[in-house]
Amino acid sequence: MPAKLSTHVLDTAHGCPASGMKIELWSLDGEDRTLVTSAKTNTDGRTDQPLLSAEEMQPGQYEIIFFVGDYFATKTTALPKIHFLDKVPVRFGIADAGASYHVPLLCSPWSYSTYRGS
């Protein structure tokens, strides 16, 4: 299987995939940040395309920003206008550009967790 970077977002407050969440992928080089791509999750909580394809994979430091506050604001009006969680950054490194990296996010308006998936 070719290398790639992918993600999957699950809405643990409602027990479903987080459909329609905005995601940004940034490449980090010291203090410099470069926007690599942005996407929205589909009905399965995944992006339609990998965030990085095999040809785009490069070793380095990256950050995925999940727009959790905006997502939950569309799901309920019972939340305060000032979100407890707004943009959730997940910084990680790609050491082996020939390997696949999967960065899932499980989130609610008040908590989140992530791990390196398969």
Image (cartoon, rainbow, N blue to C red):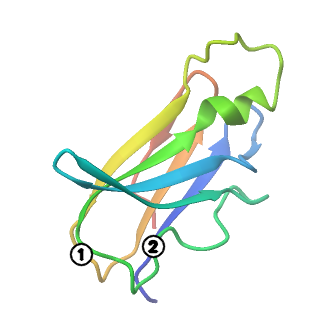
Identify the residue position indicated by label 1 in the image: 96
Residue 97: percent from the left, percent from the top? 28, 78
35 versus 96 height, above or below: above
The residue nearer to you, when weighing 48 against 115, is 48
Q: Earlier in the sequence, mark 1 or mark 2?
A: 2
User: The residue under label 2 is which amino acid type?
Assistant: Leu
Residue appearing at x 40%, y 82% in the figure: 3
**Mark 1 to mark 2: distance in Å?**
13 Å
Mark nearer the viewer, 1 or 2:
2
Quadrant of residue 81 in the image?
Answer: top right
Quadrant of residue 62 in the image?
Answer: bottom left
Query: Element at badge 1?
Result: loop
Identify the residue position indicated by label 2 in the image: 52
Circle 1 Cα neighbour tier, 10 Å, few/some/many (<14 / 14–19 / ≥20): few
Quarter placement of the C terminus: bottom left
Residue appearing at x 64%, y 64% in the figure: 47
Residue appearing at x 70%, y 36% in the figure: 71
61 versus 6 height, above or below: above
The residue nearer to you, when weighing 111 against 71, is 71
The image shows a total of numbered marks equal to: 2
The residue nearer to you, when weighing 14 against 18, is 18
The residue nearer to you, when weighing 67 against 105, is 67
